[in-house]
Image (tube, grey):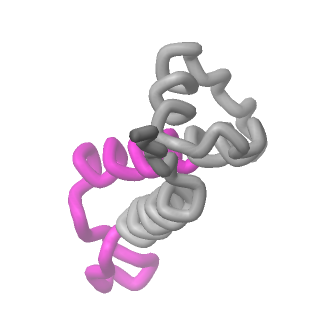
Amino acid sequence: MSQKQPTPSTEIFNEIADQCSLTTPKRILQSIITQIDRAEEAKRRIEEEGIVVRDIKGSVLPHPAIKIEADAQKIICDLLTKHKRREVFKL
């Protein structure tokens, strides 16, 4: 199943860019936005379907989207930490 990647709005892109270093590559900014979209989609699925699901045998399991959301959030935090803007103050 292949889905077309959503095009981030300029507003969201600028918000992320404002939090990152001026030298952060555009591709990194786009990756952060992709992970945000992925985490939000996983969160929506969890809200709609619940935090547990049943497998083919009827056993109750944690919803797979929980791991997807957590992984995406970790990637977002890691990228923002690595590329965060450091303020320079002139005296």
- Total residue callouts: 0
Q: Can see residue 81?
A: yes
Residue 18 lies, with reference to residue 60, above or below; the image says above
Residue 26 lies, with reference to residue 82, above or below; the image says above
Q: Position of residue 58 (x, y in %)?
A: 32, 80
**Which residue ends up furthest to the top in the rendered image?**
10
Report the front residue among 4 and 76.
Answer: 76
- Which residue sits at x=45%, y=77%? 56
- Which residue sits at x=66%, y=22%? 7
Left or right of residue 10, residue 23 in this image: right
Residue 9 lies, with reference to residue 86, above or below; the image says above
Report the front residue among 82 and 9.
Answer: 82
Residue 66 is drawn in which quadrant? bottom left
Residue 87: within the magenta?
no
Residue 87 lies, with reference to residue 10, above or below; the image says below
Residue 21 is drawn in which quadrant? top right
Report the front residue among 38 and 77.
Answer: 77
Residue 49: within the magenta?
yes
Left or right of residue 1, residue 54 in this image: left
Q: Can see residue 68?
A: no
Q: Position of residue 25 (x, y in %)?
A: 76, 43
**Which residue ends up furthest to the front in the rendered image?**
91
- Which residue sits at x=72%, y=36%? 3
Q: Position of residue 78 (x, y in %)?
A: 51, 66
Quarter of the figure that contains the C terminus: top left
- Which residue sits at x=53%, y=23%? 14
Q: Position of residue 29 (x, y in %)?
A: 64, 40
Report the front residue among 20 and 86.
Answer: 86
Residue extent of the magenta highlight: 35-63
